[in-house]
Image (cartoon, rainbow, N blue to C red):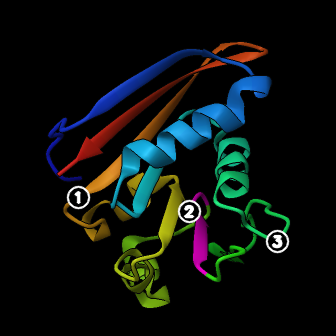
């Protein structure tokens, strides 16, 4: 992974499902021109749920789901842009990600949301966003936003 250079950060300490789209909109705003965003958090913490909320904010037309059996799902927005959702949990090696062309997605200029990014650390662009999700209780999450690079 690249060194942690905290250029911009924000913390949403007590997020419920009802708050999720409002927080997703704020996160997109914080990303600015950055298009690659990694999501970290334990299994079941809500990474895919948050990505779905972000998709709604970005006006993704398709039904979003976790790319559990493929590495990436591609979605289109109403404006005709692509949004990529990566779930790298089952990835065997960084080389496998390279062979699939992960870097091409990362440098496409389209939004890329990456679950289990530790599997592709060296392939991430120099500047990227990170969303850390921490379970507070069964109905709330702490969401932290950072920019690296």
Residue 111 percent coordinates (x, y) = 49, 67
- Based on the picture, tell me whether residue 88 belongs to the magenta stretch: yes
User: Position of 48 compared to 125: left or right?
Assistant: right
- Can residue 44 be seen here? The reply is no
Mark positioned earlier in the residue sequence (2 or 1): 2
Query: Which image quadrant for residue 119?
Result: bottom left
Residue 80 percent coordinates (x, y) = 65, 83
**Element under disc 3:** loop
Q: Which mark is residue 88?
A: 2
Q: Give the farthest residue toward the right.
A: 63
Mark positioned earlier in the residue sequence (3 or 1): 3
Q: In the rendered image, which residue does mark 1 sit on?
A: 127
Question: Marks 2/1: CA distance?
Answer: 20 Å
What residue is at 28 percent from the left and 43 percent from the top?
147
Query: Which image quadrant for residue 106?
Result: bottom left
Asked if the residues shown at circle 2 and circle 3 are in contact, with their CB atoms under 8 angstroms apart, the answer is no
Vertical position of residue 109 compared to residue 3: above or below? below
What residue is at 54 percent from the left and 34 percent from the top?
41
Q: Nearer the viewer, mark 2 or mark 1?
A: 1
Vertical position of residue 143 compared to residue 81: above or below? above
Q: In the rendered image, which residue does mark 3 sit on?
A: 62
Question: Marks 2/3: CA distance?
Answer: 21 Å
Span colored in magenta: 81-89
- Based on the picture, tell me whether residue 18 belongs to the magenta stretch: no
Of 7 and 85, the residue lying toward us: 7
- Can residue 100 be seen here? The reply is yes
């Amino acid at each position: 992974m690249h060194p942690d250079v905290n250029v911009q950060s924000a913390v949403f300490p007590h997020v419920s499902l009802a708050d999720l789209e409002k927080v997703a909109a704020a996160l997109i705003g914080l990303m600015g021109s950055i298009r690659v965003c990694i999501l970290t958090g334990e299994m079941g913490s809500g990474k895919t749920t948050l990505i779905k909320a972000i998709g709604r904010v970005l006006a993704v037309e398709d039904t979003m789901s976790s790319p559990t059996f493929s590495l990436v799902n591609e979605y289109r927005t109403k404006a005709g842009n692509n949004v990529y959702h990566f779930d790298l949990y089952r990835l065997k090696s960084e080389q496998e990600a390279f062979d699939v062309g992960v870097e091409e997605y990362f440098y496409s200029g389209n939004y890329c949301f990456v679950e289990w990014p530790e599997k592709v650390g060296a392939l991430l662009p120099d500047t990227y966003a990170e969303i850390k999700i921490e379970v507070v209780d069964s109905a709330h999450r702490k969401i932290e936003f950072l920019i690296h690079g």
